[in-house]
Amino acid sequence: MIEVTKDLPRSADGLQMDWLEVPFGPVFSGLPGGLKLTLTLDGDGVTEGQATSLVGMTTEGKEDEAMDADTFIEHLSTAMPLAPVSYRLLACRAIEQAAGLEDDPEISRAREVALERERIGSHLGWLAQLGRQLGFAWLAQRASTLQLEIRDANRDRIAALEPAFRTLGTRLERTPLLKSRLKGIGVLPSESSDLRGPVARAVKEGGDAWARLWQRLTEISASLDLIKSGGEPELPVLRDIGDVSGTGEATVDTPRGEARLSLKLERGKVKSYQLDTACRHHIDLVAKLAEGQELGDALLAVGSLDLSPWEVIS
């Protein structure tokens, strides 16, 4: 045995054994499709972890690839299927700023309501994913059903669904073993840099998977309140910009955190752009959260980040 194992890496317990590199994804229950997670396993422990996107887009457009403004908006929103409203709004804001248009409060209010509706739906999608990962079939089914119901709902329908959201939150709070399974998993220190969205806000409450769960539930409640005080949700549509040129910048707090877009408009066409997203930075957290953890804990930690592979841009 000494001869056979002499060149093998040494485990944390002092034993020498083979380390296995195991891929999870791009199709793996409990993780978003399109995300490839590669873990190096020492028994059931993770020694290394890395995540890559197989579907992400580029961060910038080139000068020789100009697009009509409306075409660009469709391109960006279609490229982000987990948050199309957020990126449609981001593009509209940047283009309208480049065109020198003043803010229209009524239009902005309808757009914001649509954004909050998408935030609720996105967080429900993550809850369904968490249910699949934990083996809670009831959570996966209930969250998925509510996500479908709210996707195109008007304000009255959203208000009618509010008791169902409250009931879901109460049941999660009373679910045995949920807190013990998530508490202390995937802890991010308060000094972590460039965190955004729910991941960043949850750091103040402990920075673990449990805190990220409750941050998203809190945001669902806040979004419901904002929708009740707003108008009807309307899909962002570009206002008339004419045949203008200019530069514009915009920021939108998407369900996963701030996305930023700067672009150059020339005679009504988007000549170039630069895009920055939360997931572009959050994917780098995978190695830190996975290494040194048991396999099940590592997968929960990665899942709790709610990474969208489409928003991991290069």
Image: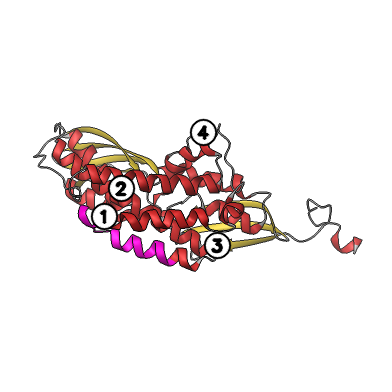
Q: Position of residue 145 (x, y in %)?
A: 36, 65
Q: Please state the extent of the stretch shown in magenta in the rendering.
A: 141-158
Q: In the image, 239: left or right of 230?
A: left
Q: CA distance from mark 1 to mark 4?
A: 36 Å
Of marks 2 and 1, which one's residue comes earlier in the chain?
A: 1
Task: Indicate the amino acid at tag 3.
Answer: Leu
CB of mark 1 within 8 Å of CB of mark 4? no
Q: Residue at x 24, y 59 (%)?
A: 152
Q: Residue at x 34, y 49 (%)?
A: 119
CB of mark 1 within 8 Å of CB of mark 3? no
Of marks 2 and 3, which one's residue comes earlier in the chain?
A: 3
Q: In the image, 314: left or right of 116?
A: right
Choose between 112 and 143: the one closer to the eye: 143
Residue 193 marker: 4
CB of mark 2 within 8 Å of CB of mark 3? no
Task: Indicate the amino acid at tag 2.
Answer: Leu
Q: CA distance from mark 4 to mark 2?
A: 30 Å
Task: Indicate the amino acid at tag 1.
Answer: Ile
Residue 141 position (above or below residue 8): below
Q: CA distance from mark 2 to mark 3?
A: 27 Å
Q: Identify the residue under disc 2.
A: 224
Q: Identify the residue under disc 1.
A: 158
Q: In the image, 266: left or right of 256?
A: left
